[in-house]
Amino acid sequence: MFGNIILVGFMGSGKSTVGKELSKLLNRKFIDTDEEVEKEEGRSINDIFNTQGEQFFRNIETKTLESLLEKKNYIISTGGGIVLKEYNRQLLKKIGKVIFLHADVNHIVNNVKYDDTRPLLQTEDWIKTISEMLESREDKYLSTADIIIQTSGKNIESIVQEIISLL
Ligand code: S3P
């Protein structure tokens, strides 16, 4: 038994895909904080941001995280901004082993370019937005992580195998 495994990282770094694959291979339950927020609210993240704003979303995100304290042996994938609050970072460490999927700008740009489900990237110069956000969040991901995995240029299978070898 490894306890809970939590994937953190920027939007488009592969957290959900890697998480689902890990859950299959390790035969563990999977939970995604973004999906939990959407279930709780009965609407999409875009909708929540557009009608009630980011702060409202962040509050539900934190409540979702609090509810995960009671989970055992889950694979948990998180929203990219979960590390922004110090309180969330403490919760993450309590919930389980935190794995940071570290991707570079190109990798992220490729993964999100046809995707309009991320409200924070609906800007005129979204590539610039990504590189600025990445820079401002990097320290927070790093300080929360127990394990750092470089994902750029790797396929899902090798990322998953690398994680399993480190557990
Ligand atoms: C966000 C990342 C998104 C989602 C929301 C905000 C962020 O999750 O939680 O759009 O602040 O980075 P993904 O990382 O799964 O895209």
Image (cartoon, grey):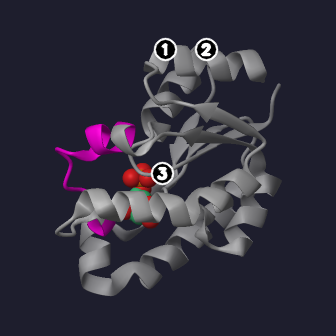
Question: Mark 2 touching mark 1, by CB under 8 A?
Answer: yes
- Using a 10 Å C-alpha cutoff, classify the residue at mark 3 as few (fewer than 14 neighbours), some (14 to 19) or many (20 or more): many
The front one of 4 and 13 is 13
Query: Which residue type carries mark 1?
Result: Glu
Spatial CA distance of label 2 from label 3 is 20 Å
Distance between mark 1 and mark 3 Cα atoms: 19 Å
Q: Can you tell which of label 2 and label 3 is closer to the viewer?
A: 3
Q: Residue 157 carries which label?
A: 1
Ligand 1 lies in quarter: bottom left
Residue drawn at point x = 45 percent, y = 64 percent: 133
Q: Mark 2 points at which residue?
A: 161
3D distance between C-alphas at marks 2 and 1? 6 Å
Q: In this view, does 116 lie to the left or right of 38?
A: left
Q: Quick one: SS at disc 2?
A: helix
Mark identifier at residue 10: 3
Percent coordinates x, y for residue 35 in the rendering:
41, 53
- Range drawn in magenta: 107-120
Residue shown at 73%/73% (left/top)?
87
* Residue 108 on the magenta span: yes
Point 66% across, 37% down: residue: 74
> In the rendered structure, are the residues bearing label 1 and label 3 in contact, judged by CB atoms less than 8 Å apart?
no
Q: How crowded is mark 1: few (under 14 residues within 10 Å), some or many (20 or more)?
A: few
Which is nearer the N-term, disc 1 or disc 3? 3
The one nearer the camera, 13 or 92, is 13
The three-letter amino acid code for the residue at tag 3 is Phe
